[in-house]
Amino acid sequence: MTLVSISGNLLFIAFVCYLVATLFFGGAVKGSKTETTNFEKRWGRIGIVVTIIGFISNLGYFVTRWIAAGHAPVSNLFEFTTAFGMMIVGAFILIYFLYKTPLLGLFALPIAIIIIGFASMFPRDINPLIPALKSYWLYIHVITAALGESILAMSAVAGLIYLTKNIDLTKKSKQRFWLEAVMFTLVLTLGFVAASSTFKFMDYEASFNYIDKEQKAEEITYDMPPIFGMNEYEALTPGTMEPLAETPPIVNAKKLTTVTWSLIFGIVLYGLIRLIIRKPISALLQPLAKKANSQLMDEIGYRAVLIGFPVFTLGALIFAMIWAQEAWSRFWGWDPKEVWALITWLFYAAFLHLRLSKGWQGEKSAWLAVIGFIIIMFNLIAVNLIIAGLHSYA
Amino acid sequence: MNKIICACGHENPEGTVLCGNCGRPLTEEAENLKLVDMRYEGSARRSQTYNKSIVDKIWNFFSSVRVGVWLIVIILVAAAIGTILPQVLYVPATVEADIAAYYERVYGTFGKIYYELGLSDLYGSWWFQTLIGMLGISLIVASLDRVIPLYKSLKKQRTRRHESFMKRQRLFAIGENKLGEETLTRSEQKLTELGYHVKREDGAVLGERGRFSRWGPYINHLGLIIFLFGVMLRALPGFYVDETMWIREGETRAIPETPGFYLESKEFILETYDKDQADDVFDEAIDRVGTIASNYQTDVVLYKKPEDALPGQTDKLEEVKKDSIQVNEPLKFDGFAVYQMDFRLDELRTMHFDLSNKASGESLGELSIDLVEPETHYDLGNGAEVELLRYYPDFSGFEDGEPQTKSPVPNNPAFLVKMTTPETPEGETSFVAIKQTVEPFGENEFKLEFKNVDTRDVSGLTIRKDKTLWILALGGLIFMIGVAQGSYWNHRRIWIHETKDGRLAVAAHTNKNWLNVKKDLDAVTEAASLPPYDDQQDLEALEEKKDGEKSS
């Protein structure tokens, strides 16, 4: 077995462990009446042990892949996103030992699972480093930034629990709608995973010639049936689907197609879930969340931001600036990824200042934490895939 | 200025909410609150005290956290809008008209509007910079407005506080004093053990730890102010140099903006990953992506002009050092850094021709034309000669029968030559370009035949000097110290009083991290048999407790 395949297997073991641990945390929460019964302690303890085994295996993946590649596995979208998922589990373990609440695991681990699943849909081969990435700052900057983001993500997990518990789901309200929208977004991510896996399994491929926005002739290969065709496309693969619509040159129809398929799969998946459970997902989770103590969740949400904010600042701004000065000759260049790191930082700065004002605790604070996580994910996914810039390595 | 005199006799400045001495609420509003606002207990902020002159009004505006948050949010939204389309800096056009055309051509009407509104250069716009400036002012004013009263209030803390102050703390207990005198002694001991600074005065104990964490926010704001100051300095001449230069292999050029430094490019190197040589684990990626670059490098020699050299004199350069400039490894000297930023491969250098007889194919000799500094006469011997009448380095076609050149860069060289041989002593004129020969005055007997060409690579280098870097680094460092201090440490206080009626009142406060102060209070409660406390903000726990009491 090569080091690369060992690495892949370790990641798979970690993935399975997280799934199993989620079930144990679920058992711990469901079986408990008040916060600390023996039952909860036992199941919770098994849950955290399994989580830690998974995390060690996950670290094993990271280290073996590092050795195999000769550089830290944070240099493309698959590697970075996987590392981010791993660090979310790490941050959860940290918070678990501070606050001993299994409920957090029940929400945090599925999010980590979705993120790792999402990551594995991107090309998984090991890239050699391009000149711009050849620097030890790659490890320092990216790992610290991801660590900061993962701790900040814990705040969103606590916020989500707070909201699931405290929003009245029996009455129609904006809050109820948006909470379910958050759940729906998580299902959409699964939709992307389902769509990618399905078409990968079918070995789908369709190539086209097209004219890009600079009026140059280019070729592109879709890995999903083309719902949208590129500007002035011309099919090259016989026997594949004819695109339903052609897009103007500035739109990347391949990406639009991927998004559309993810939406279709996601909506079908969500529909199926609703059909089976016969109520909104948030309503399914509410009885579990009811076991939480709101004050504690509020404090975890705040504490996670307090712990994560300095780490994020150091990794995503300060180390980033030092490296940018070395590699690109300027510490700041308003590159989209840089700007979105600044936006994330400003957002959490606003969060911390709002906590000082009256009324911005509890529910409002929980919403802010969730929005913060959305901004982080936007910077991770959308800025890489949609807004092109210096950071588009994937 | 009016003073507020508290029931305990202490004189408080106007604007004070809690008495600086005993902690009694001084305003009706504060009295009606279940829990007190502990932020600036016992002292008045300037912004809450004065509101008369225009200075007061401006001060009050910028001291407000709400205004600060609004500024942050506006900057955040503006910054996001700036990422919708690429900024001017990243657009492949330099002239204003080209840039405008680029946005419209590539992004349509939306691009045109985006450009017209100035959003394509958003971060350099006056209004964005004004917003940043306002945020800077807000940082200074809001910090000053708060840090002084906070310092005063924490410095003159009294050990004994009024009961109304105690019972409005989030963690509060009142109950029987089981151990009498012993209670305070044991509490004192336990608190000291837990790392608290303890004061004891007439039947009251105050334990306090981590007060320095309260300065964290002000220190990190100071760091930010220093950072912004450093950024502002860059606008002054002499602090900041940003130049680019293109240098060809074999060339020696003055480095712009430097005091007499010259750079010679020995060689430009472009390396890519090769499947045979690179590690096997990379094979799949190389197959999928195609060519992946592994190195961009310019080997250079840095020279300095001697002090006594005349301007423009370059023959006596002194070598300073040899270096290889790579991405991530700039050449550094005298506060300057030279970066490998760009390159052009295979720029034409010298063209080689053969003068031959068209009919017989017989060669009369070869000539080489330097495309940067061409000579005008080429003597091939045996009476054959070529005269270069005109040189068009970047030939772009004919206009009114005249050849045109687009630029002075030899991208597509063309020549108007006069060939003289013993057989054609008057000479024949010919226009020679790559793959094209025009004979303007009728059929010639001889032709210049293109043999081959020498090329060389060009390196695109960026020259930077930034004298503000140390200020920015200092600002960053101070920010990190402040933000860590405020986030990873917290200020905890525990008050334990004997009340007048012989009972015991306990209260605790922290600015962050209630979990830890609860742990500490649990430990003290156990050690000194204090009455059990309630978290007055944790309504769910209170409710549960009430239910428990009812059912039992």
Image (cartoon, grey):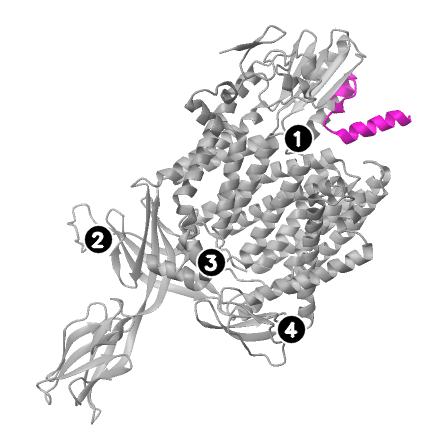
Asked if residue B327 shows in the view, the reply is no
Q: Is residue A3 left or right of residue A176?
A: left
Q: Residue at x 76, y 53 (%)?
A: A19
Q: Amino acid at mark 3?
A: Phe
**Helix, strand or loop status at disc 3:** helix
* Marks 2 & 3, CB-CB < 8 Å contact: no
Q: Amino acid at mark 1?
A: Asn
Residue A204's disc is 4
Q: Where's residue A266, x and y in %?
A: 70, 60
Q: Mark 1 to mark 4: distance in Å? A: 53 Å
Name the quadrant containing residue B12: top right
Q: Residues within 10 Å of mark 3 (few under 14, many from 20)?
A: few
Q: Chain of mark 1?
A: B
Identify the residue position indicated by label 2 in the image: B317
* Quadrant of the rendering where the C terminus of chain A is positioned: bottom right
**Helix, strand or loop status at disc 2:** loop
Of marks 2 and 3, which one's residue comes earlier in the chain? 3
Q: Mark 1 to mark 3: distance in Å? A: 48 Å
Residue B110's disc is 3
Same chain letter for marks 1 and 4: no
Q: Residues within 10 Å of mark 4 (few under 14, many from 20)?
A: some
Q: Chain of mark 2?
A: B
* Quadrant of the rendering where the N terminus of chain A is positioned: bottom right
From the image, state whether disc 2 or disc 1 is nearer to you: 1
Q: Amino acid at mark 2?
A: Leu
Q: Amino acid at mark 4?
A: Tyr
Q: Mark 4 to mark 3: distance in Å? A: 35 Å
Q: Residue at x 27, y 63 (%)?
A: B250
Residue A284's disc is none
Asked if residue B334 shows in the view, the reply is yes
Identify the residue position indicated by label 1 in the image: B513
Q: Mark 2 to mark 3: distance in Å? A: 54 Å
